[in-house]
């Protein structure tokens, strides 16, 4: 089973590489405003997870730079996700707000809906 998952993961990554979406181009001021907000966001993910790939592609397509955190291997990001987010599940978007509060958003569809709502994307 582990070998099948590894092979499927590599196929997903290859297809993602071959069909990488081109990011939209915005006016500099609009992109800077987006960059300032997304600078406080982090996406906890597994590199070959199909739902993580879906989320990363959406972010890239809409030129939303978000820090990527590999939560699969033992380390600080996995520990932080479990300690602060409450569970070891990806994708998970950590949203640090200006008032100091933090929101942990799980599920690729929920993350995409949040991003679409936040930036009025189609």
Image (tube, rainbow, N blue to C red):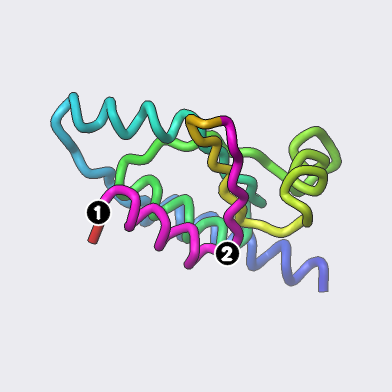
Magenta stretch encompasses residue 21: no
Magenta stretch encompasses residue 104: yes
Q: Nearer the viewer, residue 24 or 13?
A: 24
Which callout, 1 or 2, points to the residue nearer the camera? 1
Q: Nearer the viewer, residue 63 or 33?
A: 33
The answer to which image quadrant residue 90 occupies is: bottom right
- Seen in the picture, residue 66 relative to 105 is either above or below; the reply is above
Disc 2: CA contacts within 10 A as few (<14), some (14-19) or many (>=20) = some
Residue 21 located left or right of residue 89? left
Quarter of the C terminus within the rendering:
bottom left
Residue 76 located left or right of residue 13? right
Please tell me which of labels 1 and 2 falls first in the chain. 2
Q: Is mark 2 on a helix, strand or loop?
A: loop
Quarter of the N terminus within the rendering:
bottom right
Q: Which residue lies furthest to the right in this view?
A: 74
Which residues are drawn in magenta? 100-119
Numbered mark located on residue 10 in the image? none
Q: Position of residue 72 (x, y in %)?
A: 76, 49
Residue 103 located left or right of residue 76? left
- Tell me the chief SS of the magenta region: helix
Disc 1: CA contacts within 10 A as few (<14), some (14-19) or many (>=20) = few
| Identity of the residue drawn at 40% across and 48% down | 59
Q: Where is residue 115 in the image (x, y as percent from the top left)?
A: 39, 53
| Identity of the residue drawn at 39% across and 54% down | 58
Which residue bears the numbered disc 1?
120
Q: Where is residue 64 in the image (x, y as percent from the top left)?
A: 37, 40
The answer to which image quadrant residue 5 occupies is: bottom right
Numbered mark located on residue 107 in the image? 2
Q: Is mark 1 on a helix, strand or loop?
A: loop
| Identity of the residue drawn at 42% across and 57% down | 114
| Identity of the residue drawn at 32% across and 51% down | 21
């Amino acid at each position: 089973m582990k070998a099948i998952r590894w092979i499927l993961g590599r196929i997903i990554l290859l297809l993602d590489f071959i069909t990488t979406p081109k990011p939209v181009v915005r006016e500099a001021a609009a992109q800077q405003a987006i960059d300032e907000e997304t600078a406080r966001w982090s996406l906890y993910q597994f590199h070959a997870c199909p739902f993580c790939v879906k989320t990363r592609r959406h972010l890239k397509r809409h030129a939303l730079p978000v820090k990527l955190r590999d939560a699969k291997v033992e380390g600080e990001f996995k520990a932080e996700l479990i300690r602060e987010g409450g569970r070891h599940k990806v994708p998970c978007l950590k949203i640090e707000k200006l008032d100091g509060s933090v929101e942990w958003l799980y599920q690729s569809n929920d993350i995409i809906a949040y991003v679409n709502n936040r930036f009025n994307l189609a």
